Image: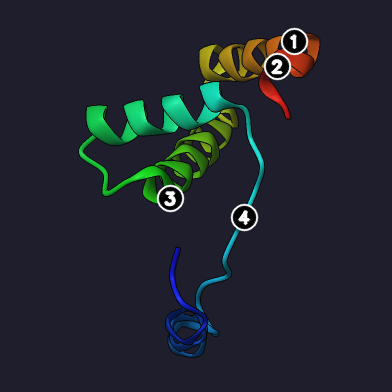
C-alpha cells in the first residue's frame, strides 16, 4: 500500500486527467483482469479495466453500422443482466 504522501503526490500530479477508482469485485473479476493484462500485453489490472472500456466503446460504435456487432452487443448485455449476480459483487 502506498503511503499517504505518495498518494497525495499522485493526486496532485494527475488531478486534471485521472481519478482513482477503488472498487470491490469478486475474485473471478480480478483473475480475469490479470488474464486480460497477460493476454494483451497490458501493464496490469488498471490498464486492463481501461482496455475493457475501450473495447466496449469500440463494439458500441461498430454496432451503429454493423448488424452482427449490434447482435453481439445485445447478446452480451442480455447475458450479463441475466447472470448479474454471478459477476457483480
- Label 3 vs 2, first from the N-terminus: 3
Name the residue: 65% across, 10% down: 75
For the residues labelled 1 and 2, the Cα–Cα distance comes to 5 Å
**Going from the N terminus, do you reach mark 1 or mark 4 first?**
4
Real-space CA distance between mark 1 and mark 4, rounded to the nearest whole angstrom:
23 Å
Q: Nearer the viewer, residue 32 or 18?
A: 32
Relative to residue 83, is residue 55 depicted above or below? below
Instruction: State how far apart marks 1 and 3 are (Cα).
Output: 24 Å
The residue at which mark 2 appears reads as 80
Task: Pick whichever, 21 or 4, lies toward us.
Answer: 4
Question: Dot 2: what SS?
Answer: helix
Say whether disc 1 or disc 3 marks the residue closer to the N-terminus.
Answer: 3
Q: Is residue 27 above or below residue 74?
A: below
Quarter of the view holding residue 72 = top right
Task: Judge from the rendering whether residue 25 lies leftward or rightward of residue 89; answer left or right.
Answer: left
Which residue does the numbered mark 3 point to in the structure image? 46
Instruction: Relative to 67, say whether 53 is above or below.
Output: below
Residue 27: percent from left, percent from top: 55, 26
Whether tag 1 and tag 3 are in contact, CB under 8 A, the answer is no
Label 4 or label 2, whichever comes before in sequence order: 4
Q: Is residue 55 left or right of residue 84?
A: left
Mark 4 burial class by Cα count in 10 Å: few <14, some 14-19, many 20+: few
Identify the mark nearer the N-term, 3 or 4.
4
Amino acid at each position: 500500500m502506498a503511503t499517504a504522501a505518495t498518494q497525495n503526490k499522485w493526486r496532485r500530479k494527475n488531478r486534471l486527467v485521472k481519478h482513482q477508482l477503488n472498487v470491490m469485485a469478486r475474485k473471478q473479476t480480478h483473475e480475469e483482469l490479470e488474464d486480460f493484462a497477460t493476454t494483451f500485453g497490458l501493464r496490469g489490472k488498471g490498464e486492463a479495466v481501461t482496455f475493457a472500456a475501450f473495447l466496449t466503446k469500440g463494439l458500441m460504435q461498430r454496432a451503429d453500422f454493423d448488424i452482427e456487432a449490434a447482435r453481439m452487443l445485445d447478446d452480451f448485455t442480455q447475458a450479463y443482466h441475466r447472470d448479474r449476480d454471478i459477476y457483480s459483487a
